[in-house]
Amino acid sequence: MASEIATVVQNFGSTIGLVADLDLSKNGTIRLNLTEDFGIDFEEDPNGKTVWIYCDLFPGADKTQQEVLFQLLRLMFTHHRTSDAHLTIDPKGFSIMLVSSFSCNSTTAETLPPVERLDEHLKNFVALVEALRTAANEK
């Protein structure tokens, strides 16, 4: 049986008009390629109510120079009130990831259905990715 978050992700794919289902695999992961060098990875949390969202900000490029990291941290400080996303560097030190999570659980103040909340969450996530990528590429 599909978990609650898997159903939300699949319904979200249908809502945005994907030809193929956006369906978490048996191991709870899927990748959504938006452009040739911009993809978002989804990984289901074992609880079945949360999905972790990952994006490699600069695939194939090492952007771990001090001035780039400083610019990214400055922008994250600017956006920290509007996004729960955070930056992480892989243990090998070459890949900078933006990580966020989305939960099916809602507070009483939220009246939107989960699919619409996921849509808003991803819009904000993608906007933050684009802002970070643009700022780093200006350096």
Image: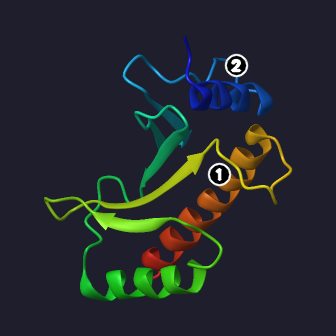
C-alpha distance separating marks 1 and 2: 19 Å
Give the amino acid at mark 1.
Leu
Tell me whether the residue at label 1 lies in contact with that at label 2, contact meaning CB atoms closer than 8 angstroms: no
As drawn, the label of residue 35 is none
- Residue at the far right: name it: 111
Q: Which mark is residue 122?
A: 1
Give the residue drawn at x 58%, y 72%.
131
Q: Is residue 23 or residue 72 the one in the foreground?
A: 23
Q: Position of residue 92 (x, y in %)?
A: 13, 59
Q: Earlier in the sequence, mark 1 or mark 2?
A: 2
The answer to whether 134 appears left or right of 67 in the picture is: right
Q: Is residue 69 left or right of residue 38?
A: left
Judged left or right of residue 92, residue 125 is: right
Q: Quadrant of the C terminus?
A: bottom left
Residue 114 horizontal/vertical position (percent): 74, 40
Which quadrant holds residue 47? top left
Query: For the residue marked with disc 2, what is the amino acid?
Result: Val
Q: Secondary structure at mark 1?
A: helix
Q: Is the residue 41 above or below the residue 79 in the image? A: above
Quadrant of image for the N terminus? top right
Tell me where residue 46 sits by quadrant. Answer: top left
Q: Secondary structure beneath disc 2?
A: loop
Residue for point 65% across, 45% down = 105
Labels 1, 2: front one: 1
Outermost residue, left side: 92
Residue identifier under label 2: 19
Where is residue 34 shown, x and y percent of the image?
58, 42
- Residue pictured at 25% horizontal, 74% vertical: 64
